[in-house]
Image (cartoon, grey):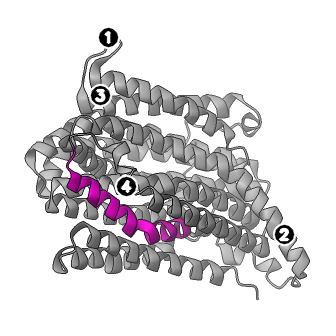
Amino acid sequence: MQPLDGHNATTPNARAPAPSLRAALAGFRREWAETLKLAWPMALTQLGQVAMLTTDLVMIGRLGEQAMAAASLAHTVLFAALVLGMGLVSAVAPLAAQAFGAQNPAGLREALRAGLWITALVGAPLTAGQFWGYELLLLAGQQPEVAALADRYLDGLAWSVAPAWAFVALRGFMGAVNRPEPALWIMLAAVPLNALLAYALIFGAAGLPALDVLGAGVATTIVNVLMCVACLLVVALRAPFRAYRPLAGLGRPDWATMRALLVIGAPISLAFFLEYGLFSGASLMMGRIGAADLAAHQVALQTATILFMAPFGISMAATVRVGQAVGRADLAGARRAGFSACAIGFVFMLAMTGAILAGRHVIPHAFLGGDTSAQTFALAASLLTVGATFFVFDGVQTVCNGALRGMGDTRVPLLFSVFAFWCVGFLAALLLGFSAGLGGVGVWAGLTLGLAVYAVLLVWRFERLTRPG
């Protein structure tokens, strides 16, 4: 099974007669409805995943400012490994969606099987790498006491990488056949379970030992493993998934499909890594400025991450809708699906940005304990203000990226990410934060500029690929 090139795959319909305005509007209304139908459970599933992380951070914040800073550094190390494989397993969704659109059930099965094999082969070495977190953080110039606390958190958290990837692959398969709801129900059960288990293991309750930050990591790993097992049971035993025999032949790797997955997924992983590297670099910059700045940065970044989940869910819906249109060789349908999703993401993020600005002085109190300095609270509010434009550009770029992945177009967006994140975003953050003396506010202004450039380039790319004629 080979990845489809979006432009070539849709050429048969490229010169179809232009529809009337009324027909075009009706098509967009139908597309908005279908996209929202797919997007809301995907977005809530993503939000549930962040809710687990946010719950951990809120509880860790009660251990003090240093523990919060350590959690930020631990996530820097964890996500560096997590995003390397995340793109590979994310490629299951466009491959499976294209197969579904082409009415190729074997292709659906092969896409999932390849994703699970990638999880096993790549997950083992990247999990092992997490246990060098202390040494990596010292090399990055972090304070030894904070690095040691971050390393303790990673001892429990590192084992969550592979089951988290498997969950993404299984969820992508579910979404490709227009049934993303089971992943949501599993996530809704996981969120309170994680909260209870994390509380018990962090502070010591229900007869369990008080493990502070280590307990938060152990709880996250246990819950991720249970979610993965639950998803495997659903796709194997429940309709409509079992009709595709998704786990048949799982013991025999399909190398052709794995190559196809790598062709699409490797650029996604690298783009994820470059984007994550930008934010990791920002965290390290904040760590050099001071612990208060790093804690404020973590509050603002976690708020951005929560907001990001809705457009990320819309992005996954766009991948499915565009991928299915590519499978049908329908260029106009792919264009309509992509731009409909972008419009939904833009409007949503614009509304959420207004809500964040209104609550910028209240939000930091949800993350930080009472012993936190007033300077940290004030800086967190300032970063949320600077992030007003950041949130909108972040939403647009992720939705448009999803649409391009549905077309199998991932290599050019990778080049865009190199330019936007590092040549623009990182350099601007460094200059504004340190050379211009703006500190954390300057770092966030640089991040915003990088995301704005990336969003514009992606929208231009999608418009060009789906242009008729």
C-alpha gap between disc 3 and disc 4: 30 Å
Contact flag, marks 2 and 1 (Cβ < 8 Å):
no
The residue pinned by badge 2 equals 27
Contact flag, marks 3 and 4 (Cβ < 8 Å):
no
Q: Residue at x 40, y 24 (%)?
A: 197
- Reply yes or no: does residue 361 show up in magenta: no
C-alpha gap between disc 4 and disc 1: 38 Å
Residue 195: x %, y % from top left: 43, 29
Is residue 132 something that shows in the picture?
no
C-alpha gap between disc 2 and disc 3: 51 Å
* Mark with earlier residue (2, 3): 2
In the rendered structure, which segment of residues is drawn in magenta?
372-397
- Badge 2 amino acid: Gly
Image quarter (top left, top right, bottom left or bottom right) of the N terminus:
bottom right
Label 4 crowd (10 A; few <14 / some 14-19 / many >=20)? some
* Mark with earlier residue (4, 1): 1
- Of labels 2 and 1, the one closer to you: 1
* Mark with earlier residue (3, 4): 3
Quadrant in the picture for residue 213: top left
Query: Which of the two residues, 14 or 304, is positioned nearer the viewer here?
Result: 304
- Badge 3 amino acid: Gly
